[in-house]
Image: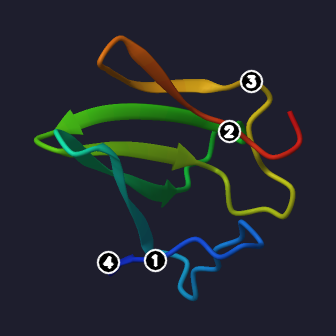
């Protein structure tokens, strides 16, 4: 499994070239704190999409299950972390 850090372009789109690639996005909200969001794309036989999260040091690892199909996304924001009493959420562009 490969992983890479990508810069988000003005289009707000990122393409992964291999089905098993992870996406790592570095976040630096202020000079005192930084972390990375790592998106892992997994599949199972359940047929439904879901997201689970764990924190590993400065990495927030989001396991996105069954997100391979076009148009798969989030229906509601998912809280990923609280920094200095501010909540950070992962959202889809069409919410």
Which colour scheme appears in the figure? rainbow
For residue 1, the mark is 4
- Inter-mark Cα distance, 3 to 4: 29 Å
Q: Earlier in the sequence, mark 1 or mark 3?
A: 1
Mark 1 or mark 2, which has the lower sequence index? 1
Q: Which disc is residue 6 wearing?
A: 1
Quarter of the rendering occupied by the C terminus: top right
CA distance separating discs 3 and 2? 13 Å
> On the picture, is 85 further left or further right than 63?
left
Q: In the picture, which quadrant includes the N terminus? A: bottom left
- The CA span between labels 4 and 1 is 16 Å
Badge 4 or badge 1: first in the primary sequence? 4
Q: Is residue 86 above or below residue 89?
A: above
Dot 3 falls on a residue whose secondary structure is loop
Query: Could you tell me which secondary element the residue under label 2 belongs to?
Result: loop
> Disc 3 marks which residue?
76
Nearer-N-terminus badge (4/2):
4
Label 1's element? loop
Q: CA distance from mark 4 to mark 2?
A: 21 Å
Q: Nearer the viewer, mark 1 or mark 2?
A: 1
Pair 4/1: label in front: 1
Residue that numbered label 2 is attached to: 49
First in sequence: mark 3 or mark 4?
4
In depth, the one of 16 and 28 nearer the eye is 28
Name the element at disc 4: loop
Residue at position x 71%, y 36% in the image: 48
Residue 47, located in which quarter of the rendered image?
top right
Mark 1 and mark 2: Cα distance apart in space = 24 Å
Pointers 4 and 1 in contact (C-beta within 8 Å): no
């Amino acid at each position: 499994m490969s992983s890479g850090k990508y810069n988000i372009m003005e289009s707000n789109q990122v393409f992964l070239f291999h089905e098993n690639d992870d996406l790592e996005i570095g976040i630096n909200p202020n000079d005192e704190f930084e972390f990375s969001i790592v998106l892992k794309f997994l599949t199972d036989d359940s047929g439904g999409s879901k997201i689970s999260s764990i924190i590993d040091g400065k990495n927030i690892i989001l396991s996105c299950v069954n997100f391979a199909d076009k148009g798969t996304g989030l229906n509601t924001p998912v809280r990923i972390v609280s920094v200095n009493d501010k909540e950070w959420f992962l959202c889809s562009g069409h919410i």
